[in-house]
Image (cartoon, grey):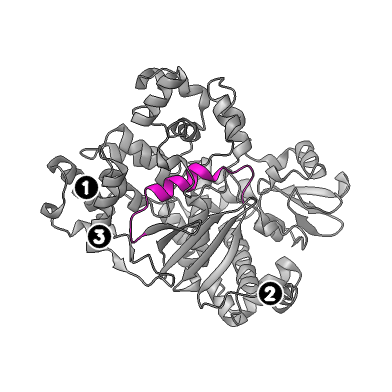
């Protein structure tokens, strides 16, 4: 789908009249007569077309004076897929805003991370989204506040500051303006049998996604490569520790038919927005699987794979630097060996944490901690030891920065310049850490094996040429090709 879908009035009206949930998050419908805004799939009777107007973001609706619908709750729509697939300034800015940077560092901090002036960022976000960074962050704070109101027994004053508001008055005014209800009225609307989580700092919520979602390779990959102490698969859920701006957390994520069941235990509730954003990003929940699968189905070789198990996502990460380190540890060794290397580093250099359920013991070590270790203690060949120490040193000093705002081409070039970094390592980091949906791994052994079995070209150059038809979704094609193998990464753990 093209950028700026909200400008295609005829298409938006059709989506609203058919209550098509695939378009939730792509645009929002504001009703001129009621001054309410909805998601396209709102269950109420659609308004007359002449009473509809369309906006690219919830923040733009709020800025124009519309209130969120109480039936369809547009503030809980999946995020727009655009911000996951775009590497331009607006896409990078939206990923940073979702990661809470504006709340922590202000608009000047956002601008500094992106290397642009605040004026340039304001202008581009207003042009594309109808709202500037402050308004977008405010809409996000309102959504976080609603989550805390509805899922915790916390006093409103604590919720206000945990959601990122500077004062209780601003919190009250914003909630009333966005939802047409006071915070107390929002809580009073909850069903009587709703019991907020009893454990302090624990929240239970549902993470929405666009259907279909195939959980097999997504959770299979995360579970099969889990680093002991940091990650585990338990009772049908993937669990892992999170290093967050104000503290640490433990996330438990389990696939359900129409949502991901999420339980977060946080040492500081101010990290809620960031924790949700990182979990969504790791599970690729803002993807548009219909657009991806439709494109891949145009290749007669891929079409049967897609039809057999549609909706595959790209398993990503909650910590880009951590993934880069693990990619180096996994060079030319088995999955089990890579886990063993990582587990040793975690035990020796990770920060200990308390897990209320037991099983998880550490946060993955920071680049700074890894840069200080003695290279001779690393049980790996000398050349890979050099690759490892060079990477962590570059990450620790900031010469290479991996994050939601990373410029994909520039970061690829910097990584390729490091000793021991070839196309496979760079592309797997681009795919799973940076989130490039078009990253491709033509030299990967599993991909070459799948290509040979399917009758595709098996040499990297010829396969890359053939894969041009899969763009801009080659990272998803990788998931379908990998799934032809019987490796544990392709199966939901029992």
Residue 291, x across and y down, in percent: 62, 34
Element type at mark 3: helix
Within 10 Å of the Cα at label 3, are there few (<14), some (14-19), or many (20+) other Cα atoms? some
Q: How far is mark 1 from mark 3, CA to CA? A: 13 Å
Q: Residue at x 25, y 40 (%)?
A: 333
In this rendering, position of residue 73 left or right of residue 87: right
In this rendering, position of residue 287 left or right of residue 184: left
Looking at this view, is 326 or 60 the one in front? 326
Q: How far is mark 1 from mark 2, CA to CA? A: 51 Å
Query: In the rendered image, is residue 97 in sight?
Result: no
Q: Could you tell which of marks 3 and 2 lies nearer the N-terminus? A: 2
In this rendering, position of residue 75 left or right of residue 409: right
Residue holding disc 1: 388
Within 10 Å of the Cα at label 1, are there few (<14), some (14-19), or many (20+) other Cα atoms? many
Membership of 225 in magenta stretch = yes
Q: Residue at x 62, y 80 (%)?
A: 156
Q: Residue at x 61, y 70 (%)?
A: 145
Residue 466, x across and y down, in percent: 46, 19
Q: Residue at x 27, y 53 (%)?
A: 342
Task: Report which quarter residue 312 is drawn in.
Answer: top right
Part of the protein shown in magenta: 209-230
């Amino acid at each position: 789908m093209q950028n700026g879908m909200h400008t295609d009035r005829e298409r938006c009206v059709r989506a609203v009249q058919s209550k098509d949930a695939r378009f939730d998050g792509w645009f929002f419908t504001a009703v001129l007569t009621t001054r309410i805004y909805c998601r396209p799939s709102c269950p109420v009777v659609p308004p007359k077309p002449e009473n509809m107007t369309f906006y690219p973001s919830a923040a733009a609706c709020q800025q124009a004076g519309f209130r969120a619908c109480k039936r369809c709750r547009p503030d809980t729509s999946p995020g727009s897929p655009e911000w996951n697939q775009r590497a331009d300034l607006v896409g990078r800015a939206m990923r940073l805003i979702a990661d809470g940077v504006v709340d922590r560092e202000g608009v000047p901090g956002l601008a500094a991370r992106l290397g642009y002036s605040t004026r340039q960022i304001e202008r581009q976000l207003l042009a594309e989204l109808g709202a500037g960074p402050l308004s977008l962050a405010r809409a996000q704070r309102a959504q976080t506040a609603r989550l805390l109101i509805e899922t915790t027994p916390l006093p409103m004053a604590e919720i206000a500051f945990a959601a990122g508001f500077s004062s209780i008055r601003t919190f009250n005014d914003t909630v009333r303006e966005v939802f047409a209800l006071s915070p107390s009225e929002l809580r009073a609307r909850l069903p009587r049998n709703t019991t907020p989580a009893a454990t302090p700092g624990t929240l239970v919520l549902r993470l929405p996604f666009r259907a279909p979602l195939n959980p097999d390779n997504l959770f299979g990959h995360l579970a099969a490569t889990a680093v002991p102490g940091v990650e585990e698969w338990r009772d049908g859920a993937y669990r892992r520790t999170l290093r967050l701006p104000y503290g640490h957390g433990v996330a438990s994520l389990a696939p359900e038919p129409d949502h991901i069941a999420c339980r977060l235990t946080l040492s500081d509730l101010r990290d809620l927005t960031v924790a949700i954003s990182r979990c969504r990003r790791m599970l690729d929940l803002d993807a548009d699987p219909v657009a991806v699968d439709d494109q891949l189905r145009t290749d007669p070789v891929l079409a049967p794979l897609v039809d057999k198990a549609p909706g595959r996502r790209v398993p990503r990460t909650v910590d880009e630097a951590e993934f880069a380190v693990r990619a180096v540890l996994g060079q030319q060794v088995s999955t089990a060996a890579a886990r063993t290397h990582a587990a040793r580093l975690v035990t020796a250099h990770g920060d200990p944490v308390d897990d209320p359920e037991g099983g998880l013991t550490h946060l993955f070590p920071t680049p700074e901690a890894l840069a200080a270790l003695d290279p001779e203690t690393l049980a790996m060949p000398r050349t890979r030891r050099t690759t490892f120490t060079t990477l962590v040193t570059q990450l620790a000093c900031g010469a290479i920065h991996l994050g939601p705002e990373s410029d994909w081409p520039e970061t690829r070039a910097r990584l390729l310049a490091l000793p021991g970094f070839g196309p496979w390592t760079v592309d797997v980091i681009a795919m799973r850490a940076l989130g490039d949906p078009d990253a491709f791994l033509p030299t990967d052994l599993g991909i070459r094996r799948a290509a040979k079995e399917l009758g595709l070209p098996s040499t990297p150059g010829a396969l890359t040429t053939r894969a041009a038809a899969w763009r801009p979704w080659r990272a998803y094609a990788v998931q379908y090709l990998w799934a032809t193998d019987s490796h544990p990464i392709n199966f939901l753990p029992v």
